[in-house]
């Protein structure tokens, strides 16, 4: 048991480059029409659900395993962003650029889903530009 405790204490703790609090503060303090810049940042494994990233610069950002459910990424720059294993339920990608962004087949299948009978609007599913579904 003591050996396990020592091994766990010696293992590096995994964390994103920015704390969730820093991200929320940056988005909240952004002036209307500005573009919060998270380019190249490690935002992996964070719960970013419900946040408004409208017009944010996320080019080259690592969002691996992040939860972007109900997030607004409309007009966001996602060029080269890593979106693998990211939760994308009801995420708004309207007019977002996603050139060379990496996604898994699972994420692409989420984008292709159509509203079901119990969903009242298309906004309840992940909205991705048609060009992303190719």
Image (cartoon, rainbow, N blue to C red):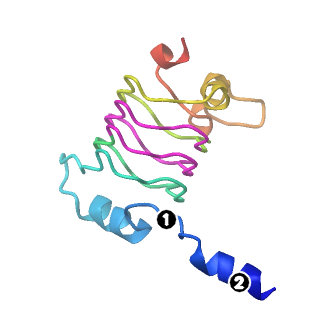
- Is residue 68 shown in magenta? yes
Q: Report which quarter residue 56 is drawn in.
A: top left
Q: Which disc, if any, is residue 5?
A: 2
Where does the C terminus fall, quadrant-wise? top right
Work out whether 90 lies above or below 105: below
Q: Position of residue 87 (x, y in %)?
A: 61, 44
Magenta-drawn segment: 59-86
Q: Nearer the viewer, residue 56 or 81?
A: 81
Image check: 102 left or right of 58?
Answer: right
Residue at image coords 51%, 38%: 83
In this view, the residue farthest toward the bottom is 2
Disc 1: which residue: 15
Residue at image coords 28%, 62%: 26
- Total numbered labels: 2
Mark 1 vs mark 2: which is more N-terminal?
2
Residue at image coords 49%, 56%: 48
């Amino acid at each position: 048991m003591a050996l396990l405790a020592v091994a766990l204490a010696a293992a590096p703790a995994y964390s994103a480059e920015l704390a969730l609090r820093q991200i929320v503060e940056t988005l909240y303090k952004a002036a209307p029409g500005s573009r919060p810049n998270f380019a190249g940042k490690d935002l992996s494994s964070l719960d970013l659900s419900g946040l408004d990233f409208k017009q944010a610069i996320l080019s080259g950002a690592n969002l691996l395993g992040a939860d972007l459910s109900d997030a607004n990424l409309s007009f966001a720059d996602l060029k080269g962003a890593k979106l693998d294993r990211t939760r994308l339920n009801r995420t708004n990608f309207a007019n977002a650029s996603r050139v060379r962004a990496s996604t898994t087949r699972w994420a692409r299948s989420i984008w292709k889903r159509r509203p079901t009978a119990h969903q009242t609007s298309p906004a309840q599913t992940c909205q991705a530009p048609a060009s992303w579904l190719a």
